């Protein structure tokens, strides 16, 4: 069972899956790092973006990888508007209320999708879905490889935004010291909304990367979001490198535990890690002590 | 005794309903609404009075439901005893989860997350382990006898759930009036300050979790007896975690009648939404979500606090006018 012929492909596959997890987690951790709340609507937004990618392909005939350039800006705008006009005003600056509002949004989005599209599971059919590259000792699926590369491209773009642009500097300022940033003339409501928009855009990219090989139904995002919560907790809330490393680690853990324990219990392995990390080291591997 | 009188009046008024209304549809609606109210009353102790927002109260509901069902089906235990054991199991689960979470100092987002994760782990475990009936679920035998805690008339089920709600109202009242309740609200308002004044915050939150778990578990026990079926999605699914927090938040978190008012309003809105559009799935929950956001945004003290909030606003407006004039 432990032969390298099985183990190495499982490891590689875990890393490739983990990259997409990392991208979902990246959006979550970005929002947490600045707004200090967990966005419980993250999974529902992922599902919504997957539906967007599905319809972009089925109705407009746009390849999911190309539709990134359409859907990511669209979801940036949606995220911006949600934070600016719904979450911000409704929560009166209280963290507890923000949790409730994002949960309410999750319920609304998920069930609106259920109402609109029923519980049917949909997939798209692209020619490269089952293509793979022969490495000699194992095969790598092309869509997963594309996803892996794209995730790192997104991470680099985010890093450039954060370090080089004015809005990036403003976001970092607000994350560090909200009141001080406000006194320096930064529009905190705007920065919050931009951050939320960026987080939502990450999810939109992840959705487009998933669509060629995955399916979508109104509950599809939930499977990812609990994994993303685990990654964010493991990597440290608000830590971007933590999200990337955590994502890869969790991808490998899931791949190995479903190899040894079977698919349904593979997920339990993730949650046990989640609970253990929360209880033993709540600040995560990369997080500063609160 | 001032606050005890309203409880008696409300319960008495609800108790005569089956004598006046004989429609099974109406009674069924009220039974389900009261069951959700009970689950919400459990959440209200911990979330409303203690400020610890759980996003996974399905942990307790599901444990109560499964313990009640499994003890009867697999072990032949008497239904009443199984019901009581289910409630106790909810309290025990409260101790375990509470001890793990509060000892680690988890608050706010973290506490919400860890409760959610526990519910999800239990859901997955329940869907694969043989004792819960795995994916198929557990079916209770139809046995319409008093000894089996099953009744031919819906009215009796109605009075049973009303009695449980009444007990939970009295427990809530007792908590509110007690020293323990004062500690609990102190922890909600400012945990560090409460600690500085010598409140053992971990013990207080743990106590609230135990009471909360037992009450919400009772709702789960009732579910099994009433519907005679339970599976992992019903027991540990997100729906009950959401409804258990929705009802007190909408009705008024940290008030005695909040969950009851919230459950009746939420369920009525849900039924209304389904009536308007036919039985389309999902629409009732869309309405719940919108109401949740609207209440948090516009009436942070819930429907029970709305009157006081409006009165205060009106007084301020009048004072403003007076000072201008």
Image (cartoon, coloured by chain):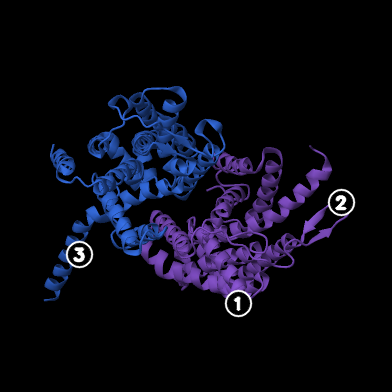
Chain colours: A purple, B blue
Q: Horizontally, is B28 left or right of A227 in the view?
A: left
Task: Give the distance between the C-alpha atoms of the residues marked 1 and 3, in whole angstroms.
Answer: 52 Å
Task: Give the distance between the C-alpha atoms of the residues marked 3 and 2, in whole angstroms.
Answer: 73 Å
Q: Which mark is residue A50?
A: none
Write down the residue under mark 2. A137
Write down the residue under mark 3. B313
Q: Is residue B58 visible?
A: yes
What chain is tagged by disc 3? B
Q: What is the quadrant of residue B42 in the picture?
A: top left
Circle 1 crowding by C-alpha within 10 Å: few under 14, some 14–19, many from 20: few
Q: Quadrant of the N terminus of chain B?
A: top left
Q: Are marks 3 and 2 in contact (CB under 8 Å)?
A: no
Mark 3 secondary-structure assignment: helix
Residue placed at 65% from the left, 58% from the top? Answer: A20
Residue placed at 64% from the left, 63% from the top? Answer: A211
Q: Which dot, 1 or 3, sits closer to the camera?
A: 1
Earlier-in-chain disc, 2 versus 1: 1
Q: Horizontally, is B263 left or right of A122 in the view?
A: left
What chain is tagged by disc 1? A
| Marks 2 and 1 share the same chain | yes
Q: Are marks 2 and 1 in contact (CB under 8 Å)?
A: no
What chain is tagged by disc 2? A
| Marks 1 and 3 share the same chain | no
Q: Horizontally, is B94 left or right of B5 in the view?
A: right
Mark 2 secondary-structure assignment: loop
Q: Which dot, 2 or 1, sits closer to the camera?
A: 1
Q: Quadrant of the C terminus of chain B?
A: bottom left
Task: Give the distance between the C-alpha atoms of the residues marked 2 and 1, in whole angstroms.
Answer: 39 Å
Circle 3 crowding by C-alpha within 10 Å: few under 14, some 14–19, many from 20: few
Q: Position of residue A76 (x, y in %)?
A: 54, 71
- Say above or below: B190 vs A157: above
Write down the residue under mark 1. A60
């Amino acid at each position: 069972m432990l032969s390298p012929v099985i183990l190495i492909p499982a490891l590689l596959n875990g890393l490739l899956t983990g990259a997409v997890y990392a991208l979902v987690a990246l959006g979550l951790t970005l929002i947490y790092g600045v707004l200090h709340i967990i966005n419980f609507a993250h999974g529902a937004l992922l599902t919504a973006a997957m539906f967007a990618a599905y319809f972009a392909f089925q109705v407009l005939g746009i390849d999911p990888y190309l539709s990134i350039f359409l859907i990511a800006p669209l979801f940036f705008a949606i995220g911006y508007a949600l934070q600016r006009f719904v979450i911000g005003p409704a929560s009166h600056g209280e963290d507890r209320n923000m949790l409730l509002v994002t949960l309410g949004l999750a319920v609304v989005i998920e069930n609106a999708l259920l109402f609109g599209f029923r519980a049917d599971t949909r997939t798209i059919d692209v020619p490269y879905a089952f293509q793979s590259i022969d490495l000699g000792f194992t095969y790598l699926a092309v869509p997963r490889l594309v996803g892996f590369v794209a995730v790192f491209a997104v991470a680099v773009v985010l890093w450039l935004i954060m370090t080089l642009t004015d809005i990036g500097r403003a976001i970092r300022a607000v994350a560090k010291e909200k009141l001080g940033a406000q006194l320096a003339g930064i529009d905190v409501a705007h920065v919050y909304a931009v951050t939320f928009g960026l987080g939502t855009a990450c999810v939109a990219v992840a959705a487009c990367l998933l669509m060629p090989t995955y399916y979508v139904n109104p509950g599809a995002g939930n499977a990812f979001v609990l994994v993303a919560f685990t990654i964010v907790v493991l990597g440290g809330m608000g830590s971007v490198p933590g999200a990337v490393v955590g994502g890869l680690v969790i991808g490998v853990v899931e791949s190995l535990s479903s190899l040894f324990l079977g698919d349904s219990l593979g997920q339990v392995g993730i949650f046990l890690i989640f609970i253990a990390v929360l209880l033993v080291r709540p600040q995560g591997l990369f997080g500063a002590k609160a | 005794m001032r606050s005890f009188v309203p409880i008696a009046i409300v319960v008495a008024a609800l108790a005569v309903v089956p004598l006046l209304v004989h429609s099974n549809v109406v009674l069924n609606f009220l039974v389900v609404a009261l069951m959700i109210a009970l689950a919400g009353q459990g959440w209200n102790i911990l979330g409303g009075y203690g400020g610890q927002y759980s996003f996974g109260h399905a942990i307790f509901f599901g444990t109560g439901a499964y313990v009640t069902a499994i003890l009867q089906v697999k072990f032949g235990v008497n239904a009443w005893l199984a019901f009581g054991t289910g409630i106790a199991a909810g309290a025990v689960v409260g101790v375990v989860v509470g001890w793990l979470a509060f000892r680690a100092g988890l608050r706010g987002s973290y506490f919400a997350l860890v409760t959610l994760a526990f519910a999800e782990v239990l859901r997955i475990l329940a869907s694969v382990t043989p004792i819960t009936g795995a994916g198929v679920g557990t079916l209770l035998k139809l046995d319409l006898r008093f000894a089996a805690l099953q009744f031919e008339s819906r009215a009796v089920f109605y009075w049973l759930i009303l009695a449980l709600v009444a007990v939970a109202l009295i427990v809530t009242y007792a908590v509110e009036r007690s020293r323990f309740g004062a500690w609990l609200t102190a922890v909600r308002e400012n945990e560090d300050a409460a600690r500085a004044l010598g409140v053992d915050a971990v013990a207080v939150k743990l106590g609230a979790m135990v009471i909360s778990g037992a009450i919400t578990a009772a709702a789960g026990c009732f579910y099994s007896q009433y519907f005679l079926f339970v599976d992992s999605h019903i027991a540990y699914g997100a729906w009950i975690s959401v409804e258990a927090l929705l009802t007190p938040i909408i009705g008024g978190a940290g008030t005695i009648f909040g969950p009851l008012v919230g459950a009746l309003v939420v369920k009525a809105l849900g039924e209304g939404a389904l009536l308007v559009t036919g039985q389309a799935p999902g629409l009732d929950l869309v309405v719940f979500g919108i109401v949740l956001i609207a209440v948090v945004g516009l009436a942070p003290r819930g429907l029970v606090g709305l009157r006081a909030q409006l009165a205060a606003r009106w007084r301020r407006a009048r004072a403003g006018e007076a000072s201008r004039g």
